[in-house]
Amino acid sequence: MSRRVQKPKPGPSRRRSPARRVRRWPWVLLALVLLVGAMAGAVGHWLHRPLSLAQPSIEMTVEPGDSPRDIAHRLVDAGVLTEPRWLYEYFRWSGQARAIKAGSYEFGAGTRPVDLLRKLVDGDVTLARIRLIEGWTFRQWRAELARHPDLKHEAATLDDAALMAAIGAPGLPPEGRFYPDTYAFSKGSSDLAVLRRALHAMQRHLDNAWQGRLDGLPLKSADEALTLASIVEKETGRASDRPQIAGVFINRLRIGMPLQTDPTVIYGLGAAFDGNLRRRDLETDTPYNTYTRGGLPPTPISMPGRDALLAATRPGTTNALYFVARGDGSSEFSSNLADHNRAVDRYQRRAGKP
């Protein structure tokens, strides 16, 4: 005989009802919203709060190829007192990390993370300046570039020929080929980059001057005009005298008369020149001695400026063949040797010059 098995009565269920689970979701969502809001508020506060700096102002350089992580660490190493990870994550989160530009930057008190990134993306670099003077030689230019503390000195190990090749002008003699001016550059830039800009600037100015030259000049090329301009640059610092001085040299070239200009002789002496030009120097033949050789010297002798370039290509109309310095920066011009000798006696021999 079979027994009827009674099923146990179900006890109270431990499972929560769907209704109770649904009632808890708003609280979970609210907690998440509050958490996200708190995090967003903290991030927003950090982004718009001035960063602490180790000094009143700091400088750092972004090198080409630096990653966002590299840049964040460079900033902290330079003196931004924050976690580099925060900067790195901000750069990534902003979507502008790849837009950061290489260069040198300066950040002062009050700089916020948003300001910092904006400056890096805008390429608002810190600029240094160097002034390269009219009438200086290439040797003087190289020395000035080598002294500048904000340049990367890549030319130091190069001779003149290698340097010209490095800036895209292989085989070109460097003298006279760079335009005198004040050049602004990002700190940490290469000295070769400055020279490359000056090279291109001189070519532009020379081309413009040569295209606007007077007809009938005894100059065969723009390079000869550059050489003449370099001599004019060394002969006077007075802009008003340059066209007439150029006119004297043009007159001499036309009739085959030696230029007889002291600056070319001095240039030919190089480092041997001690500041005192002697008669034996004028009589010693070198490629740059325009007393012993006719025509223009083989290369320019200095870096001519715009006025000298224009004077060489648009010389003043004059019948003068001679000039002598008066001692006040101006020159006395003469059309014959007798008048010239009297001017020399008046302005130089009386002053005790040989």
Image (tube, grey):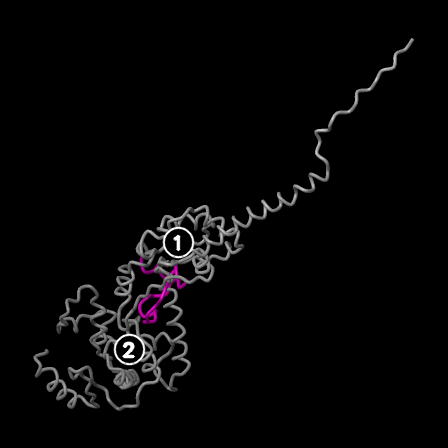
What residue is disc 2 on?
295
What residue is disc 1 on?
51
Q: Mark 1 or 2, which is nearer the eye?
A: 1
Instruction: Measure how far apart labels 1 and 2 are at the Cα level.
Output: 66 Å
Q: Say what amino acid the circle numbered 2 marks.
A: Gly
Asked whether 175 falls inside the magenta stretch, the response is yes
Residue 95 vertical placement versus 290 (above, below) = above
Residue at (24, 89) in percent of width and height: 320
Q: Earlier in the sequence, mark 1 or mark 2?
A: 1
Asked whether 63 falls inside the magenta stretch, the response is no
Quarter location, residue 25: top right
Residue at (46, 62) in percent of width and height: 122
Q: Which residues are magenta?
A: 159-185
Measured from the top left, where is residue 214 in percent x and y? 38, 86
Position of residue 29 in the picture relative to residue 69 (left or right): right
Q: Say what amino acid the circle numbered 1 marks.
A: Leu
Of residues 98 and 237, the one nearer the viewer is 98
Residue 186 vertical placement versus 234 (above, below) = above
Measured from the top left, where is residue 99 in percent x and y? 50, 57
Q: Residues within 10 Å of mark 2 (few under 14, many from 20)?
A: some
Position of the N terminus by quadrant: top right
Q: Residues within 10 Å of mark 1 (few under 14, many from 20)?
A: many
